Amino acid sequence: MDFSLIAMQLFSGIALGAILVMAALGLSIIFGMLGVVNFSHGAMFMVGAYAGLWVASLTGSFWWGLFVAPIAIGMFGMAVEFLLIRPLYGRSVDDPLLLTFGLGYVLVEAVRIVFGSDGIPFPTPSQLRGVVNLGIGYFPIYRLFVVGVVGAILLALWLLLGKTKFGLIVRAGARDPQIMRVLGVDIGKVWLLVFGLGVGLTALGGVLAAPMRTVNPEMGSLVLAEAFVVTVIGGMGSLVGSVVAGLLVGIAVSMTALIAPEMAQIVMFALMALVLLIRPQGLFGKSGVQA
Amino acid sequence: MKKHLLSVENIGRTFGGFKALEGITVNFEQNKVTAVIGPNGAGKSTFFNVLSGVLTPSSGRIAYKGKDLTGTPQHRFVHLGIARSYQITNIFPLLTVHENARVAAQAMHSRYNIWSNRERLKDLDEKADAALNAVGLHGCRDAVAKFLAHGQQRALEIAVALVADPQLLLLDEPTAGMGPEETKDMVALIERLAAERTILLVEHKMKMILGLSDRILVLHHGKLIADGSPQQIQSDPEVRRVYLGQSHGYA
Amino acid sequence: MTNINPIASPLASAGRAPATLATAGGWRAQLVKWRVPLSILALCLLPWVLPSKALAVNVLIYGVVCVGYNLLFGYTGLLSFGHAAFFGTGAYITGITIVHFGLPWYAAVMLGVLGGGLLALVIGALSIRTRGIYFSMVTLALAQLVYYVALQASNWTGGENGLRGFTVSKIDIFGLHINFLDPLQKYYVLMAFAGLALWFVSRILNSPFGAVIEAIRENETRARACGYNVERAKLMSFTLSGLICALAGTLSAMHLAIVPLDSLHYQTSGMIVMMTLLGGAGSFFGPFVGALAFLLMEDVFSIWTSHWQIVVGSVFILFVLFLPKGIWGALLAWRASK
């Protein structure tokens, strides 16, 4: 087992983790602000991939797909929030969960109707093909790109949430929406934007993941479970937790694939079980503060 | 040496960096009514939560009838004889009044029986009805709890605690949200209960407390700043300063 | 986070919790008293009323799953999204013990039930460390773990292709020789088990423990203050629920003679949730009605289109929005208000 192989596998794990982070972050942001766990999150990831595919095939450019798809799906998310989730406000906390689960069902089937049930390969854009030698090994350029994009998004999010008025509202409103209303903040608009942001992030994850996997209607179902695992490990509602846990899980899966490939998927669930035993609130979650 | 029913020694409780309670040492005697008062944020709820097992103290000890109770899980408390009512009504909304009391009574007897028919446990009905009688709710025993008037819900709140036949009854603002008439009824109820049990209550209504209590504890910023009879407390300069310095005076 | 009115339990505010029996009038109390015989009667008639015997068997099996699931969801108030794990495990153990160990069918069934129950105990112990929505997420993820283990352990489970090679063709019991390959005879054998399961659940609901789980659903904090060990009671409910679902799984294995891998997938868990809600989580009959409604819809819609799932999913969304009590629950509420 030479160092170069380990380094490449490690990096592969980071790339995988980056995708997980995108999915988990979206989930976490929506939950933190609206108290809603979006059970159609995996389906949105998948729809993002398909949207990227479709725009790319229309325009002939991956970049258009990468740019347009998350925005379009984000807007779709806003419509979902306004039409389907907002009417449930004040009812049982389980209702949005159940509704979004049904929505996921519908989305998967809708994609099957429009695009068919078979997987569609998504070619890596020509500018990002191939490998580059970084001294310790040859790294796929596309994966470097993915890590780069996710890193840039994280930076942008950090600036958005930490330095803007909107970000302040999001962070404060997560604690008490009543206070926000009293202070004259249009909480409805904030919810709309936050839900759209969360969905857009996961759709972006889908587009980014598309060249790395086959695009098929089922690709979201694993992502949902993965996003849950990452959120549980990282801590519910903690954005830092989602990032750290996402990378951790990505690396763990990738390294396990090196040693015992059949255990690779299982190891992330085993990690989650371990966290539940030792620290149920997650690595960065607050003790006793749960849904 | 008087036998203390409940004694707490140097109780402290911190949340993160915030000291909600600090260095509280008190001995509670049997069959007295003790009130805990203090401005908002003084730590009264935290103190109650520590005494009823909802929170474990960060430091110090609780002893009940001589036995160390620190760290005991909350659900054991009522079995030991300590029951509480809550400031925000905490009952079973969709069950009837009678069912509320009955399920509370059942906790003393049968918690894991999946086989017998629970209708057969007749003595539970008697215990439940006795508690409802004691608080004056026997007339509406079949009403669904959610639809009761506020005052009746507060009474049910107490009945549910009472049904366990506790020696120590912790009442958290029993007259919360009540007008003068309902408050009078509640005071009368508490006086009746005090004849056989030790009562500890948190309240804001000063006139009520002064008339009802044998002893008053005053908390401020998590510390015990005064402890004495109503007359002593009324003339305590520190207490006056703490209360008159606030915008909420005597209620 | 929204400040939920402390006096209303989540299910209560959704209108899904069972109405108190005492206030609902004599007819409701009678319905409760005779619920097991009535259910069994309905089940006896099912193969004659429904368009196909296969549909009837499915309604039977999924009806039992949903009734078992409802013990945890409707009566204890815990929304698990991982109950397929127990259903699937019951099925797999039944198949595995017949295929790999050559055990007779009744031993396979018993082991299936016990195995599923044991798994429920373990998963429950882990999940109950969390609450609310978090709990739903954890149950989904832990069940998915079971899925992946089954996928990988293909020597035992057949992996992606599912477990095959065990057909129960005849059952000799109490001197009766039953031809299990005959659809009608098969149905009534499975119905006997289903009846037992329903009777068991009914007993639990009538028992002191039944009052405990309802108290927990209504107000967990108050239940704890009353002296109930809430975590232990939840775990017990979880395990009992898992046992019933595992039994349904064993019945499914015997019926299909295969165990598809998807029986462990969270889509199956979700389907169980949907069925239960469609019928009404707040009652004993509701889950069965829901299973019937769901499977009928699938039967009917799949004639017109292979994309019937989109219809079912949309119907479910509409139910969540407008009819949270479910079909049976709404019927009961309407009847009670007259």
Image (cartoon, rainbow, N blue to C red):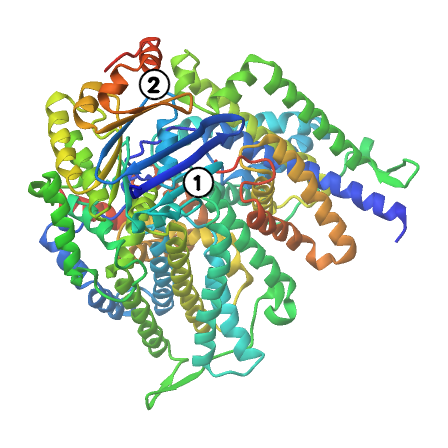
User: Between A223 and C114, which is closer to the camera in this rendering?
Assistant: C114
Chain label for disc 1: B
- Identify the residue at the far front of this view: B1
Q: Position of residue A122 (x, y in %)?
A: 71, 40
Instruction: Please tell me in which quadrant of the rendered image residue B124 appears.
Output: bottom left
Instruction: Report the residue marked by disc 2.
Output: B39
Amino acid type of disc 1? Arg
Residue positioned 83% across, 44% down in the render: A8
User: Between A181 and A274, which is closer to the camera in this rendering?
Assistant: A274
Determine crowd level at label 2: few under 14, some 14-19, many 20+ residues with C-alpha closer than 10 A: some
Instruction: State the separation of the CA atoms marked 1 and 2.
Output: 25 Å
Earlier residue among tags 1 and 2: 2
Does residue C258 appear in this view?
Answer: no
User: Between C26 and C312, which is closer to the camera in this rendering?
Assistant: C26
Instruction: Report the residue marked by disc 1.
Output: B61
Vertical arrangement, residue A135 with respect to residue B220, above or below: below
Residue positioned 15% across, 52% down in the render: B127
In terms of secondary structure, where does tag 1 sit?
strand
> Are labels 1 and 2 on one chain?
yes
Vertical arrangement, residue C59 with respect to residue A60, above or below: below
Vertical arrangement, residue B10 with respect to residue B179, above or below: below
Chain label for disc 2: B
- Identify the residue at the far right of this view: A135
Amino acid type of disc 2? Pro
